[in-house]
Image: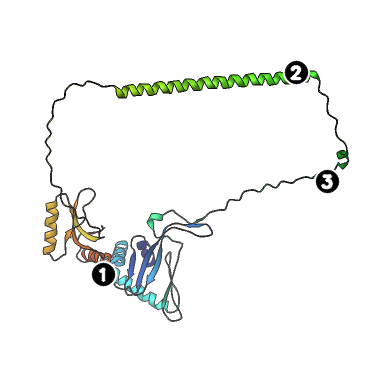
Amino acid sequence: MQLTRYIQELLYQYECVTIPHFGAFLTRPLNAKVSEKGDFYPPRKEVTFNELLKTNDGILAHYVAQKEGLSYENALRHIEKEISSWKKRLKTQTLRFPGVGEIRLNLDRNIRFTPWEKVNFDPSSFGLSHFKRETLHKPRIQTKIISPMENKNNDDLMFTPEKEKKSPLMRYAAIGVIGIALLATSYYFGDQYVAEQRLVAQQDAQKQIEKNVQEATFDLGSLSEVEVSITAEPIPEEVVSDQEYFSVIAGSFRSLDNAESKVNALIEEGYTAALAQQSIDGLYRAAYGRFTNKKEAINLLYYIKYTLKEEAWYLEE
């Protein structure tokens, strides 16, 4: 029987998986973090082990029975047999739970658990992995200043080149080019000024039209009075509270009377029944009990589902 694999699968669904007469694996949520070295870690759930939680809560036995096609009692016997083998092996060697961690005895003969941190048991972070931000380096451009003393042809510095003589034809050509540039510039800026003035005039005209429309009055004639009768229906009371509740739901009803009838029937059977928070769809929920302690609600849920074989489900309000 692959009991270690079943434990790993249940840790994705439950915060606590108890192994009868051995201990319990617990998951603790951790937020995303960034280290000083630029390492990014997504949100995850860390696994711990508590050897004091040994009471059977039925989760592991029920899951094994479902996977192996056994009855609840037979599944519980197989688990007890496997745990007995674990206790014998633990005296001389390390117990390994693939994907979860390792359990060994320290020098004081106490159980020590080492988690295997490569598996993230948070389903909401599926596909997110650890990565490291690479530092961006800007290339350095080195400029070298060459001094006159580094000129190889130092002898050339002893002479000053003679100024070239410019002919009158080149002077007239330069004057002509400058004149053409001035004419083109004046034409461009003049055309741009005319376009801007035209745009300003269009905007002023549009504002004047909007002002005339706003100041205009319209004769719509006289309107006859219309009588409207409104009947207000009472709104059913909802269960609203700032206190966080953990409820075990027995059923959901469209009618408030049916939900209250179910609550009264559960009270007669001995439950501390009550109406839970109304659903988004407008359904009224009748609960076996509403608790401020999550563990009490879970214990009642397991008792109803696995002992009484009744239909029920868990709700956090």
Residue 218 quadrant? top left
- Location of mark 3 (residue): 149
Looking at the picture, tell me which residue is in the foreground, 185 or 57.
185
Amino acid tagged 2? Tyr
Pointer 2 local density, CA inside 10 Å: few below 14, some 14–19, many at least 20: few
Disc nearer the start of the sequence (1/3): 1
Q: Is residue 297 visible?
A: yes
- Location of mark 1 (residue): 73
Residue at 55%, 19% in the rendered image: 191
Report the side of 198 relative to 159 (left or right).
Answer: left
Q: How many marks?
A: 3
Estimate the x, y position of residue 238 in percent, counting from the top left: 18, 53
| Helix, strand or loop for disc 1 | helix
Q: Is residue 1 visible?
A: no
| Helix, strand or loop for disc 3 | helix
Residue at 38%, 77% in the rendered image: 87
**Disc 2 vs disc 3: Cβ atoms closer than 8 Å?**
no
Amino acid tagged 3? Met
Pointer 3 local density, CA inside 10 Å: few below 14, some 14–19, many at least 20: few
Looking at the picture, tell me which residue is in the foreground, 31 or 89.
31
In the rendered view, would you say 121 is above or below 227?
Answer: below
Discs 2/3, front:
2
Estimate the x, y position of residue 22 in percent, counting from the top left: 35, 74
In the rendered view, would you say 99 is above or below 51?
Answer: above
Discs 1/2, front:
2
- Location of mark 2 (residue): 172
Give the alpha-carbon distance from disc 1 to disc 3, as whole Å. 100 Å
